Every structure is written in structure tokens, then in C-alpha cells.
Amino acid sequence: MIKDLITKSRSYRRFFQEVAIDRRILRELVDLARLSPSAANLQPLKYILSCEPKKNALIFQHLGWAGYLKDWPGPAEGERPSAYIIILGDTEIDPAIHCGANRLTPPSLWRGCDHGIAAQSILLGAAERGLGGCIIGTVKREELRRALALPARYEILLVLALGKPKETVVIEPVGTGGDIKYWRDNQGVHHVPKRSLDSIVIG
Ligand SMILES: Cc1cc2nc3c(=O)[nH]c(=O)nc-3n(C[C@H](O)[C@H](O)[C@H](O)COP(=O)(O)O)c2cc1C
């Protein structure tokens, strides 16, 4: 059932780093993104795959993890993602493609949806395979661009961290105070408050 798969597909940030994900699996996941909707059917997204420890380490140092967990700097060595998919926008296909909120005017407003859809397709495919991951928008983009020697035509939109999850993530209702910040308990369980259906269907 799609609801089961979506429920299982949480944001995971700690992994069994020793469990490798090979390039063939990453290509199969990108193929799910390839089949996903695209504004004006432009299909401006391109992808960089990483599953080698050296390249993974290079990517890792440019990512920001779990902004609400102030005392947690991100996954420790041994619990880091074993693979990444970097979603790029090809500006030679769509000059308006961007990663930030500063150009949210038509048509870049709706064209800006493609990478989110692609990310979710990939994460659902990962969940179906017993893997998990996290969409990372907090990326030192210029530094990562330089580290990867990425040509100027590509914008780094999102980084997807992937691996075999090593943590428990639970969904719970947003409390009466309305706080939506995720939190981690002293057993290391990660809690994600979700708003109720009645509060989001407004008409
Ligand atoms: C566009 C986008 C950007 C995100 N960027 C980050 C990020 O930079 N770092 C991070 O740890 N999580 C990031 N996340 C994950 C969210 O924090 C996560 O989706 C949210 O806490 C809800 O948890 P859930 O995915 O398990 O429902 C991002 C999610 C989205 C959709």
C-alpha cells in the first residue's frame, strides 16, 4: 500500500555505514525520478551518484544535518550514509532553475517543483528496498561545486543521503503547543510531529 510505503519512508540520518549500496541500485532509483512528473516536461534534472567511501566523505563535509537538534553535529563516522544522489538542475535546459526561495515567481515557482518530486520518488524506491535516506537542502553549494569540479551549467539543487537506517523514527501528532520541531529522546528515538489531517484540509 502506498500509505505504508510513505509512512515507512521517514528522514533517516544514522546508517549502517558498512552496508554498501552499489551504483546499479542508485541508477534504478534515478530511473524512478526519470519517470516522474516534470513542469512543461522539460526534464532539466541531472544526477551525480556516489557510493565510494572517498567520494562519500568529500560530499559529507558539505552537508548540514538536523537543524533542530542543536547538540548533534550530524552522523558520526560509522553511521554515515553509504551513498548519495546529488540532484542538479541543468541551466542549459531550464535557465530559470534554482535552489533557493529568492526567485519564487512564475514560472520558476512551479518549475521549482521537479527536484522535490524526484527526491520523493527516489526515497520511496529506497524504502521499498529496505533502505532509507534524507533530503539535504542545507548544502555548502559553492564549496561542493568546486570539490566536484562541477561545470557552471549545473545548479546543485538537493543532496539525497542514502543508506541502511540505523535509527528508529516515529511520527506523532503535533501537541497542543503547536511545536513542529522534531526531537530525539534519551533512547535515541527520533520523533517527528505531524499536523492533523483536519488542521490542513481547510476548505
Ligand atoms: C526540501 C527539504 C530539505 C531538507 N533539508 C534537510 C537538511 O538540510 N538537513 C536535514 O537533516 N534534513 C533535511 N530535510 C529533512 C526534514 O527535516 C524532514 O523531512 C522533516 O523533519 C520531517 O521528517 P520526515 O521526513 O521523517 O517526515 C529536508 C527535507 C526537505 C523536504
Image (spheres, rainbow, N blue to C red):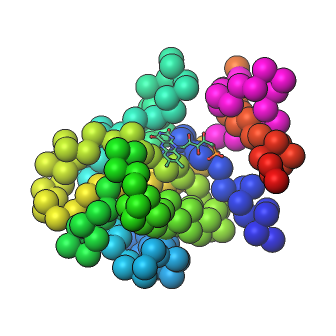
Identify which residue, 185 or 135, lies in the foreground. Answer: 135
Q: Residue 105's spot in the image, x, y percent? A: 40, 55
Judge whether 152 appears above or below 35 on screen: above
Give the prevailing secondary structure in the magenta stretch. Answer: loop
**Magenta stretch contains residue 176:** yes
Judged left or right of residue 203, residue 148 is: left
Q: Examine the rendering and report whether any part of residue 112 can be seen.
A: no
Q: Farthest right residue? A: 198
Q: Quadrant of ligand 1?
A: top right
Q: Residue 185's spot in the image, x, y percent? A: 71, 23
Residue at image point 81% right, 71% down: 1
Judge whether 201 appears above or below 67 on screen: below
Judged left or right of residue 193, residue 74 is: left
Identify which residue, 40 or 19, lies in the foreground. Answer: 40
Residue at image point 47% right, 64% down: 110
Residue at image point 44% right, 54% down: 160
Judged left or right of residue 191, residue 144 is: left
The stretch of residues the image draws in magenta is 167-185
Judge whether 23 appears above or below 71 on screen: below
Tally of numbered discs: 0
Identify which residue, 115 or 82, lies in the foreground. Answer: 115
Q: Examine the rendering and report whether any part of residue 89 can be seen.
A: yes
Residue at image point 80% right, 49% down: 202
Judged left or right of residue 79, residue 149 is: left
**Magenta stretch contains residue 105:** no
